[in-house]
Amino acid sequence: MLSPEQLIEYALQARQQAYAPYSQYQVGAAVLTANGEVITGCNVENASYGATICAERVALTRAVAQGQGNFVAIAVATRNGATPCGICRQVMAELGPHMMVYISDQQGQYRTTSVAELLPDSFAGSKLFE
Ligand code: THU
């Protein structure tokens, strides 16, 4: 199984692909599946700012589109080790509620948290069927 440092390295590499001409704030993400697959993403901005997609959601939606599931961890890399935004936390809770989350700066300095810690008491799909 990949180490946190190795998953972060994928996120740092993915960050190089960021399309961030407006904010200049490059973000990379890498999702790890239970069977050891890694799927990466970067932020993709848009002149219509609201159409921007965050790196975490690119990685997770790519993974789903590739038929992957059972996500065990996600690494997110930014210049300064920023935490994922609220929308990304909600998507993480939907697709990978049990994931560990490694939040790294551009030097690879990171901290470890979890989706449950980032989004406690989250709205879950099960509520729709009660
Ligand atoms: N961004 C991400 O990719 N992930 C986050 O969790 C927070 C923000 C991106 C969106 C935008 O391209 C840039 O960072 C500045 O907000």
Image (tube, rainbow, N blue to C red):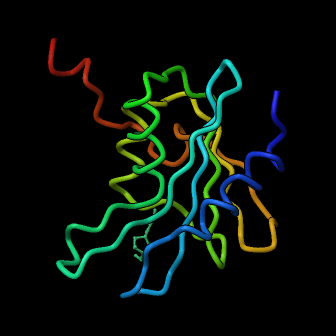
* In the image, residue 104 above or below residue 58: below
What percent of the width, then of the height, locates residue 98?
56, 27
Q: Quadrant of residue 21?
A: bottom left
Q: What is the number of callouts on the image?
A: 0
* Relative image position of residue 84 (x, y in whole percent): 49, 59
* Ligand 1 image-quadrant field: bottom left
Q: Residue furthest top?
A: 130
**39 vs 122, nearest the viewer:** 39
Relative placement, left or right, of 74 versus 22 is right
Q: Residue at x 64, y 36 (%)?
A: 38
* Residue 82 position in % (x across, y down): 58, 70
Picture residue at 49% right of the left edge, 22% below the top = 69
Residue drawn at the location 65% of the way across and 20% of the way down: 34
Residue 116 in the figure: left or right of residue 1: left
Q: Residue at x 65, y 50 (%)?
A: 75
Give percent across and percent down for residue 59: 48, 46
Q: Nearer the viewer, residue 127 or 75?
A: 75
Q: Quadrant where the C terminus lies?
A: top left
Q: In the rendered view of the protein, which quadrant contains the N terminus?
A: top right
Residue 12 in the image: above or below residue 35: below
Determine which quarter of the picture holds residue 93. top left
